[in-house]
Amino acid sequence: MDLNEVFIFIKVVEAGSFSGAAKLMGLPRSTVSRKVSQLEEALGIRLLQRTTRKLSLTHAGRDYFQQCRTAILGIQQANQLVQTSQQAPTGMIRVAGLLAVQRGFLCDWFNEFLKLYPNISVEIQLSDDSVDIIEAGVDVAFRAGVLGDSSLVARRLMESKLVLCASPDYLINSAAITSIDNIKQHRAIFVGNSGQNARWQLESDKGKVMVPIKATVVANSMEFAINTCLAGNGIALLPDVMIHEHLESNKLQVVLGEYSAGSGGIYIVYPSRTHLSITVRTFVDFITAKVTASNLLSSSKTRNSDQRAD
């Protein structure tokens, strides 16, 4: 059914004639009359009684007019509501993030954003698993690592690499680590689903090396691995960005700093560049501005380019 025919029918009833409705809509009278006839034919029932003097609604036409007019008014109100919401940031943002977001600078930025925009509410889902943001109805997601190609848009917030680190207590009470070979004798906190045949692929100026480890703790959560490392339970390979505050406060120390792994980045990901709501756009721009203004990484390591992402 053509909803345009329904709209014209309503205008005819409100104007009281085909000529009046045609004038209001800037259409030929013949077009208005034809559209109403097509609507009646599609419904299989007469809506208007036509005489040379006036139009009158049939009983079915009266019921149909009342129902359709209410529906049209609802659509108009919905349109107005959406247009109004685009004038100022308001409403709900659904965000998916890594578990580690609940601590540190990203969490602080979330709270600052909410204070700046009290008419915005945030629903955040934290998980170290990659969430299908389209299927989950998520507006924005934070992701880490090296992203592949997809139809999503990813804005790189900052570069990140995995570094070997441990707590001062662990390092004091354990054998000295003077070379990469020493790692094999130490307790290791491994991020993954299984510690069987666990190994770290590291690289330095000398090239890449595969290091077998003794995985005494295996976790599929980066947040759990960070906390376990802070508690002094071993050496871990962790993203430098996520442990920045712990390195600054000396709660964690980098071990064998010449080695690292998995150079990638922290990204903010969203479904499309076009038709982005003002609320989501405000959030994305706020986070991007905070990264640019922060001292987390040097400006040479901070990029704001868009790319495709999984």
Image: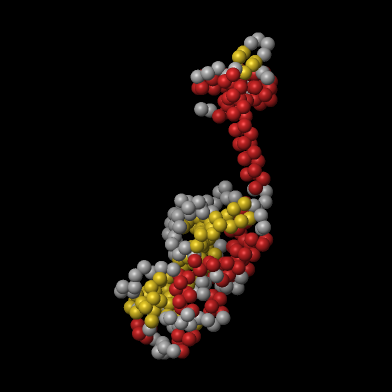
Q: Quadrant of the C terminus?
A: bottom left
Residue 162 visible somewhere in the drawing: no
- On screen, 279 above or below 63? below
Q: Residue at x 50, y 62 (%)?
A: 126
- On screen, 235 above or below 103? below
Classify residue 308 as left or right of residue 16: left
Q: Position of residue 110 (x, y in %)?
A: 60, 63
Q: Residue at x 63, y 44 (%)?
A: 82
In the depicted view, which residue is nearer to us: 209 or 86? Answer: 86
Q: Residue at x 67, y 51 (%)?
A: 88
Q: Which quarter of the picture shows residue 289?
A: bottom right
Q: Position of residue 106 (x, y in %)?
A: 57, 67
Q: Position of residue 99 (x, y in %)?
A: 49, 66
Residue 219 visible somewhere in the drawing: yes
Q: Which quarter of the picture shows residue 157?
A: bottom right
Q: Position of residue 22 (x, y in %)?
A: 66, 22
Q: Residue furthest top?
A: 52
The figure's colour scheme reads secondary structure
Q: Residue at x 57, y 50 (%)?
A: 276
Classify residue 246 as left or right of residue 164: right
